[in-house]
């Protein structure tokens, strides 16, 4: 592109939108904004989309679907779209925006007209599971159980206000009906054929996340050890700037990567019990949201990674 590409963030006043806007200062782009008084006006949004090379949707699911419909009315002038909601993460015709998903994923994102930004919990779970399934170490029907804790900033305005005003609970399990909206995304993109059990939780801290997956090594293929799992993950993510495979630690703090756009993967194994726990640590607002969006924006516009 000879001129700076134009980006319109539909929903720029929300947590993810603000995070993306702040990070875009690292890229040679121009942000096109709508008058705040008209930010929900379909006509104003359509005009903004017509001006943009790329539209980033930071909206609730139904509003994101409405925004895509508005964009489609532009026909040949419709912009490319990066959606940060849950609406299209398993939809046909959309490319999943996790560049590290497979060796070909970055190229797929580069050429896609429609990209869905991954969820925070799925980013950690898929990063841990997909390489093991692709390598034949884990069968797709393995009974996967995923536990995760996130900072309260991922829970939306009501949760943020409750924690900042009232202190909130120190720790709280939720999604115990086992119908969390991220389950289909994990199920599909991890390559599982059996629906995983997913138990999310929130702690009284603003940002950060740990996703953990316990494994019985004797139920995996090839008599693998914890070291073998580490080797498989390290090989898959070798040379990646945003995903790092590190040595096990006796303790992990969920807040350690707050404000950063990278993710750490570890294998914590016990050779005597033949058990292991896989962990992914990331910032739920970084690699789990706005940081991932910045990666995808750079890929879609052919710009250097920030």
Image (cartoon, rainbow, N blue to C red):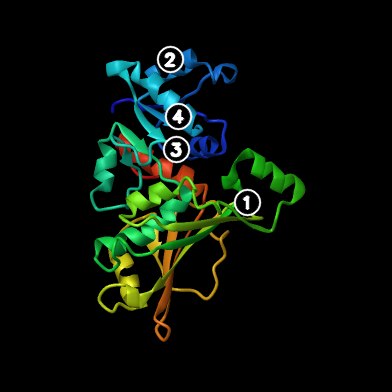
Q: Which residue is drawn at 25% across and 76% down?
A: 222
Picture quarter with the N terminus:
top left
Outermost residue toward the top in this view: 43
Q: How crowded is mark 1: few (under 14 residues within 10 Å), some or many (20 or more)?
A: many
Q: Mark 1 points at which residue?
A: 206
**At which x and y percent is residue 229?**
33, 71
**At which x and y percent is residue 223?**
28, 79
Q: Mark 3 points at which residue?
A: 84
**Which disc is residue 64 wearing?**
4
Choose mark 3 or mark 2, whichever is in front.
3
Q: Which residue is drawn at 43% across and 56% down?
A: 124
Tag 1's secondary structure?
loop
Q: Which residue is drawn at 38% across and 61% down?
A: 128
Q: For the residues marked 3 and 1, what is the alpha-carbon distance in whole angstroms? A: 20 Å
**Which disc is residue 32 wearing?**
none
Mark nearer the N terminus (3 vs 1): 3
Tag 2's secondary structure?
helix
Mark nearer the N terminus (4 vs 3): 4
């Amino acid at each position: 592109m000879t001129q700076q590409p134009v980006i319109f963030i539909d929903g720029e006043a929300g947590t993810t939108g603000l995070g993306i806007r702040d990070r875009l200062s690292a890229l040679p782009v121009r942000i096109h904004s709508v008058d705040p008084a008209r930010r929900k006006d379909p006509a104003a949004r359509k005009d903004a989309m017509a001006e943009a090379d790329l539209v980033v949707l930071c909206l609730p699911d139904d509003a994101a679907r409405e925004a895509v419909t508005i964009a489609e009315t532009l026909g040949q002038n419709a912009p490319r779209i990066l959606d940060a909601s849950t609406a299209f993460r398993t939809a046909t015709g959309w490319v999943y925006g996790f560049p590290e998903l497979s060796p070909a994923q970055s190229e797929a994102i580069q050429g896609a007209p429609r990209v869905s930004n991954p969820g925070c919990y799925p980013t950690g779970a898929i990063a841990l599971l997909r390489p093991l399934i692709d390598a034949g170490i884990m069968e797709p029907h393995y009974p996967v159980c995923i536990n995760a804790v996130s900072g309260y900033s991922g829970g939306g305005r009501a949760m943020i206000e409750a924690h900042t005003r009232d202190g909130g609970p120190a720790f709280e399990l939720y999604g115990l009906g086992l119908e969390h909206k991220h389950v289909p995304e994990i199920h599909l993109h991890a390559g599982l054929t059996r629906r995983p059990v997913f138990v999310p939780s929130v702690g009284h801290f603003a940002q950060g996340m740990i996703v953990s997956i316990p494994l019985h090594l004797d139920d995996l293929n090839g008599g693998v050890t914890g070291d073998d799992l580490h080797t498989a993950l390290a090989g898959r993510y070798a040379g990646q700037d945003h995903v790092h495979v590190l040595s096990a630690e006796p303790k992990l703090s969920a807040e350690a990567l707050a404000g950063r756009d990278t993710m750490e993967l570890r294998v914590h194994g016990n050779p005597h019990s033949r058990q292991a726990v896989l962990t992914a640590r990331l910032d739920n607002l970084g690699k789990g949201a706005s940081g991932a969006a910045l990666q995808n924006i750079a890929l879609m516009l052919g710009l250097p990674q920030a």
